[in-house]
Every structure is written in C-alpha cells, then in structure tokens.
Image: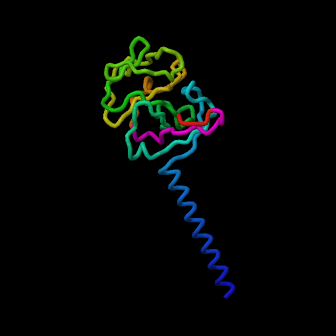
Amino acid sequence: MKHNKILREILDWALHFGIAVLLVLLVVFFLGRITVVEGTSMVPTLNNGDVLIIEAITPRFGTLQQGDIVVLRIPELLGSDNRKYAIKRIVAVENQHLQIKEGKVYVDGKELREPYINGSYTQEMSDFYSDIIVPEGCIFVMGDNRLPDKSRDSRVFGPVNKDRVIGRCILRIFPFSDFGSV
C-alpha cells in the first residue's frame, strides 16, 4: 500500500515535470526567447551586451515589415567567425525596389528616413546589391551602424530568405536604464 503511494507520487511528479518542460519548450520555440547583442553593427540603437526579448510568432505566421529589427541566421559565407546569428534592421521587403546612391537609401523611389542610423551616410559595398528588387520571400537587412566596415549585412551578402529569421526584437530588458521597446 505504501509502495503504491510512493510510486503514484513519483509518477505524479514526473507528469508535472514533463508538462513543465513541454510548456517551456513550446514557449521558447513558438513565442520567443532571450538574446544578447554581440558586436556594434546596430549602434546606436543597440549596444554590445544589451539583452533583448525576441518573439518568434511574426516570422513564422505574420508579416515582417520594413523597420523591424530581427535576429537571423547569417548566410554561410559569413559564418567563419563562429557567430551563428546577427541582429539587423529590415530596410526593404519582398518586391520592393532598393537603391543606395550618394550615401542615401531609397525604397520604391523614396528616400528612407533613418533617424536611427550612426552617421548620415550609407556606404555602398557592392554594385550588385546597390540597386535591386528584393526577391519574393526575402528581406534586405542592414545594421544601424553605417560607418565604414561596421556592419556586414545585405549590402555584402544580398537579400536574406525570410526562413532564416529566428525572431523579431520587441523589448530590451538590460541595461535597465534602456529598458523598453526597440
């Protein structure tokens, strides 16, 4: 009798533990996760060491928009520095015409207002990606730090397939002095 009670308690505990683990996995996989900014490509918006909450619903089931800050798996050609992920801002989405000329970014013929960038000049890094229609299913991303050689982004590797996006940044939780939406 006592043996059955102990066994029942163990099974009850294991069931609750299993449910808790499953819920955590569902939250992390579908809803979001926490990430730490590494590097300076998003300065002045985000700084090295900032802690962010990213949500994973929009990239999977919603629509990514121009201006969203996203975490994405970087293209393999840039993977040699052992960083698997990058944080960048979407400057153009599928079927938009993006141009970089005379230090300014134009989307569908209109100059993109970018009060968030570091500096006032956007460097052209590749003739091939300075005047492009973003392909279906892709986004064109750039770091906010547009100073020379501070951000490797779509100006270098081209448009990124949306399935490479891990999540959309929604909240900075550290440092506490900068707590809030991004």
Residue 130 rendering spot, x and y as whole percentages:
38, 19
Question: What percent of the width, then of the height, locates residue 129?
Answer: 38, 22
Q: In the visual, does 120 lie left or right of 106?
A: right
Q: In the rendered view of the protein, which quadrant contains the N terminus? A: bottom right
Q: Position of residue 86 (x, y in %)?
A: 52, 34
The residues colored magenta run 162-177
Image quarter of residue 95: top left
From the viewer's side, name the closer residue of 48 and 161.
48
Above or below: residue 108 compared with residue 94: above
Residue in front for this viewpoint, 167 or 65:
65
Give the total of numbered labels: 0
Q: In the image as oriented, which residue stretches furthest toward the right? A: 2
Residue 178's place in the image compared with 116, above or below, is below
**Identity of the residue drawn at 48% across and 41% down:** 167
The answer to whether residue 96 is magenta is no
* Magenta: main secondary structure: strand
Which residue sits at x=67%, y=84%? Answer: 3
Instruction: Name the residue: 60% across, 73% down.
Output: 12
Q: Quadrant of residue 140?
A: top left
Relative to residue 34, is residue 99 depicted above or below? above
In front here: 176 or 157? 176
Choose between 69 and 179: the one closer to the eye.
Answer: 179
The reply to whether the magenta stretch includes residue 173 is yes
Residue positioned 55% across, 56% down in the render: 24
Question: Residue 94 vs residue 167: left or right?
Answer: left
Image coords of residue 18 (percent x, y): 57, 65
Residue at the extreme top? 102
